[in-house]
Image (cartoon, rainbow, N blue to C red):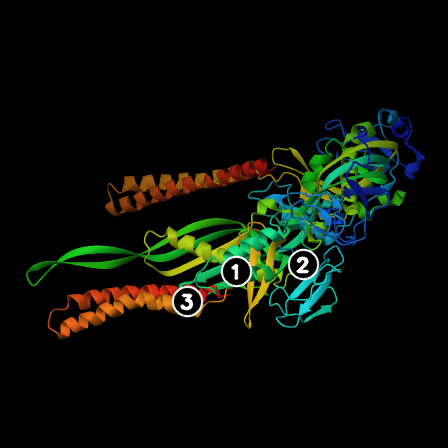
Amino acid sequence: MSERAAERTGSTIPEGWGRPLQAAVCEHCDWQYLVGADRARTRCPHCSQTALTSLEDEVGELPIVRPPEFVVPFEVSPDGLEQGVETFADGIPFPPADLNAETLKSRLEKVYLPTWLVDVEADALWEAEAGFDYQVVSHEERYDDRHGGWITREVEETRTRWEPRVGRLTRMYDNVPAPALEEDARLRERLGHWDDGTREPYQPSATAEASIALPDRTPEDAWSAAVLAVRQRAAGECQRAAAADHFREFLWTPTYGQRNWSLLLLPVYATAYRDDEGHAHALLVHGQTGRIDGPRRASLRRARRVSMIVGLVALVILALGLAMVAAGLMVPPLAAAGVAAVLVALVVGVAALAPMLLVWQFNRRQEAAG
Amino acid sequence: MEAQPFPPAGFVEAESSVDGILVYRPVPEDTGPGEAVVDFSCPRCGGTTAYSVGGGGLRCEYCGYYEAPERDVVGKGAREFEFKVETMERAAHGWGTERKDLTCEGCGAQISVPPESMTVSCPFCGSRKLIQRPGSQDALRPRFLVPFEMTDEACRRTIREWLGSSWMVPGDLERLAAAVDLTSMYLPTWTFDGAARARWRAQVGHTKTERYRSGGEWKTRTRTVWRWESGNVTRRFDDLPIPGTARLSPVLMERIKDFDLSGLVAYDPQFLAGSHAQAYDVPLEEAWEAARHRMREETRAACRDQASTSKIRNFSMELDFSDESWRYILVPAYVGAYRYGAEAYQVMVNGQTGEVAGQRPVDWTKVGLAIGAALAPGVLITLAGLVTVLLGIGGVVAGAGMVVLIVGIIIGFVIFQKARRLDDV
């Protein structure tokens, strides 16, 4: 399919999807989706801030609604998924009431993220420095008067010989990936890459019960990234052609033939929780590895409540202590107990600050990491 | 890239393991001079040509035809090779020209001569029992050589002067110069480069002088205080030569070893035309071991020199070699043997500098007379001194006689040692 055809616009969803879908958009983050008819009012899997707005008859507003060519299936096992979620929810001091493994698991939903694939023919002259490893024999020697002379140890070292190579390349590059989402790089950095070796031709059943995010980058936008991927692949092939162990300073002057664009869908799970201030936090789980990306927030409100309770206890002990000190004017032994109570009250009072400090420090660390 | 021709000059197509990708590599160096057999027949008369030292090219001894030289001087920039594992295990490529390998039944020397050579005597021992054997393939191909700078005539003049330069040799020795069976020969030599980085540690003794009181008197004594010292030494070695043959006397080889490697030229079979050449019989690994021995001993000496005094004990060091490389080169020498009486004597001349080393017969009668002459004054004066002592005149003459006798003994010993070294190999 040509680039121009790929930027298809229209008022209906193409039949190539093979099942009834509705177009929807998140008013908060502008992500666009195709969802099943029963999921039109679901929250945005990407930001979880608002419910998706169904576009009904406004599908033509969406830039790209073409069916995909390939789908990478979900591979993470249910056990692995559960374990990942439990690990995520575990270890948070004073977690928000909504942030627990059970809630997160109950909200898990399947989402597919799009990425472009391009087929292109490249014709180029290239040059590079090819490195060939070889072994050399060297020696380490020790001398000691007390041991009567030299001890020699032969060692083998690997060195690399660099030689220039030039050549001509005429190759077809199929399914070169290019980002279809503006956030593609960030998502891959946080979640890791997908192994698209397990991709399968698109079947409507593969995306059942799943939301499908639509591209927000056109093929023209994605071409510059695709060029880098083609170059990287070409460099690897030239290295293989030259039978080199290493390759550097690869330069080429390519001319490209007709480009065919298609879409590949990548699997993620989405879930979310609300903190005690009512802010929604979306989490994404890699559909192959189970790696989770999303903010882990401790609840300042819960910490504050615990601090206040402990603080009240401290105040009560302080009041009792002061009363005992006053009584001690008449019954001297009570004065000593009163002083001890005042000291205990001070310690408990200081300890009352600990939950809030703990939460503040945890959230700060999470923000720095994220 | 389009503006330039493709593939660029100096590149040849290489094997590619990927369809649709052509690979070009620089022309390999090894396809240069080498493996093809070179014909040294004179194109004019068909006679045998030989390398001309004077002209530096090929000259026909029969009709005078001369072919201009092609001398690619590379000097000390000549390529050096690393100690690759496969190099150490590799068998080689022969000489790049047709040659005949001979083995001496007398001393076991292996020599390589041109196929038309009519050599009938061994240049090392003078034996005429030479047997032909198949050309050895177990040798690395020499890539560089130092060409002859000295002609055969000049060499004979030098030998004549050298034979007559000592009074200890027989008087008729000089006239044998014309009879010396002289052979121009390229000798195999390894040269080694490397850097030695050493860390050393030792106890170094410092002498302290102390005054102390004993028996009511002040006295002085010295004692050694031992302190630990350590240091680092880095030494670079450039073109350390190690002979590639053990067939020749190491003593003679050592005396003519100073070749100027700035005169190195790329190996070309024409340089060997008319000359003998010996393949190495000291393999690379053995030569490298000898070179390393010299390198580490020199480095050890440099480490010891770093110590603050020369009193050293518990010395230890660790040494790492790096940037090791080697060259296999041929160096020119005239190797000759002559007979005096029943004995055979070797003589070698550096074919580049003219330095001579060799064995010479000793005329022990002359040497005995010389030693006797050195001892005679002392003996006579001492005897005279003994007479004066017996007569009660005094011991002054006897004392002087003893001194003169001791001087005479020393002179005699020196003469004897020098004479012994004349035929020492």
Location of residue A119 by image quarter: top right
As drawn, B322 above or below A350: below
Q: Chain of mark 2?
A: B
Amino acid type, residue under disc 2 in the picture:
His
For residue B176, say whether it is visible. yes
In the figure, residue B4 lies in which quadrant? top right
Q: Which residue is mark 3?
A: B366
Relative height, residue B282 to residue A314 (above, below): below
Numbered label tally:
3
Chain of the residue on which disc 1 is drawn: B
Q: Is residue B59 left or right of residue B13?
A: left
The Cα–Cα distance between marks 1 and 3, rounded to whole angstroms, is 16 Å
Residue that badge 1 annotates: B174
- Lower sequence index among marks 1 and 3: 1
Tag 3 or tag 2, which sits nearer the N-term? 2
Q: Residue at x 32, y 58 (%)?
A: B311
> Are both tags, 1 and 2, on one chain?
yes
Q: Residues within 10 Å of mark 2 (few under 14, many from 20)?
A: many
Q: Residue at x 37, y 39 (%)?
A: A319
Query: Who's the residue at 48% across and 63% down the image?
Result: B171
Estimate how packed mark 3 is, as few (under 14), some (14 to 19) or many (20 or more) residues with alpha carbons within 10 Å. some
Q: Are marks 1 and 2 in contact (CB under 8 Å)?
A: no
Amino acid carrying label 1: it is Glu
The label shown at residue B276 is 2
Q: Answer with mark 1 or mark 2, whichever residue precedes in sequence.
A: 1
Dot 1 falls on a residue whose secondary structure is helix
Position of residue A50 measured from the top left corner of the image (x, y, whole percent): 73, 30
Residue A140 visible somewhere in the drawing = no
